[in-house]
Amino acid sequence: MISEKYISLGKTEIKISPIGLGIMQWGDIKTPNQPDIEIKKDIQEIFRVSLDMGVYFFDTAEIYGNGQSERNLGLCLKEASEKIVVASKFMPFPWRLSKRELRSALNASLKRLGLVNLDLYQIHWPFPPVPIKNWMDAMADAFKEGLIRAVGVSNYSAHQTEIAFDMLSKQGIPLASNQVKYSLLDRHPEKFGLVDLCKKLNITIIAYSPLEKGILTGKYTSENPPAGYRYWRYSKSFLKKIELLLNELNEIGKNHGGMSPAQVSLNWLTSKGVVPIPGAKNMLQAKENAGAMGWQLSSNEVEQLDIISESIL
């Protein structure tokens, strides 16, 4: 199912697909005994099927695999003829104290990606000690010089987002986006005023972890919980608690021609005007993610999922 619908990135002229692809895993995708050539093949397959299905928005960051995610995306970009929107992020480590640090990091990201400018550049976290204003000034300089086409932030609260918006507005530059954790099992952006603020200011919300590490795919149950560190967060008791939600996702999916719980979960976000950026470990997952585009939940279905989700949270 190929989606022809595109949406605006904030108040910018940039158009993106309703769903993007988060490629943090491309920085550390290796599995035991897997040759590098197979890893590159997997990445290229994920990239190609995403494009074929209408996903043209790719999000990475300098810290994903210490730049390896950007390098892998850069290799894919060389082989693509489509117009692709690329987003990356600057990490304001406490020892990065000046605007020069952002410029240096941006140049390094551009080199790894093989680009002359970046569509969307984001401040990864609102870490101290450098004030938000200073980083927005550095972003504005990069914007005016044509090194970036849009400015975004990530993990900013409503208050911090408003500060960033005001600082950029003084220089005639819109704040395009805020990337935050957001899903049916994590609705903090709604509860703490961020969603309302972003709607008011026309700032696009980009949602990472929209499937909660695979929990919303229906893959795991109380009888079949995830292994490793995820078990401590998504224990048998938690999975038992969310059975009603998973059942509803299945039922709604059936009403839309057999959409999966993952696709319904992603569509719940797009129905709210949010751009989810799920990851994909393989071509099949990339195809399933893209299948959440091209159709829409009814307002009643969105409301029902809201109610069930709220009762769990």
Image: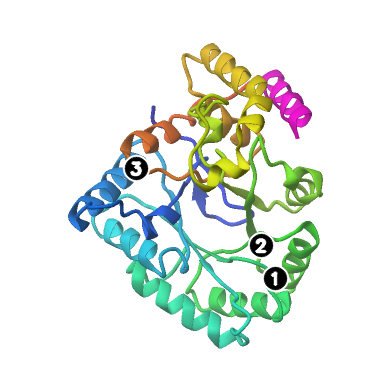
**Dot placed on the residue nearer the N-terminal end, 1 or 3:** 3
Q: Quadrant of the C terminus?
A: top right
Q: Which residues are magenta?
A: 298-313
Q: CA distance from mark 3 to mark 2?
A: 27 Å
**Dot placed on the residue nearer the N-terminal end, 2 or 1:** 1
Q: Quadrant of the N terminus?
A: top left
The residue tagged with tag 3: helix, strand or loop?
helix
Asked which quadrant contains residue 291, the reply is: top left
Q: In front: mark 1 or mark 3?
A: 3
Question: Which residue is tagged 2?
Answer: 175
Question: Which residue is tagged 1?
Answer: 168
Question: Which residue is tagged 3?
Answer: 51
Q: Amino acid at mark 2?
A: Leu
Describe residue 50's horizontal placement relative to residue 96 as left or right: left
- Main structural element of the magenta stretch: helix, strand or loop? helix
Residue 230 % position (x, y)? 54, 44
Please count the marks in the image. Answer: 3
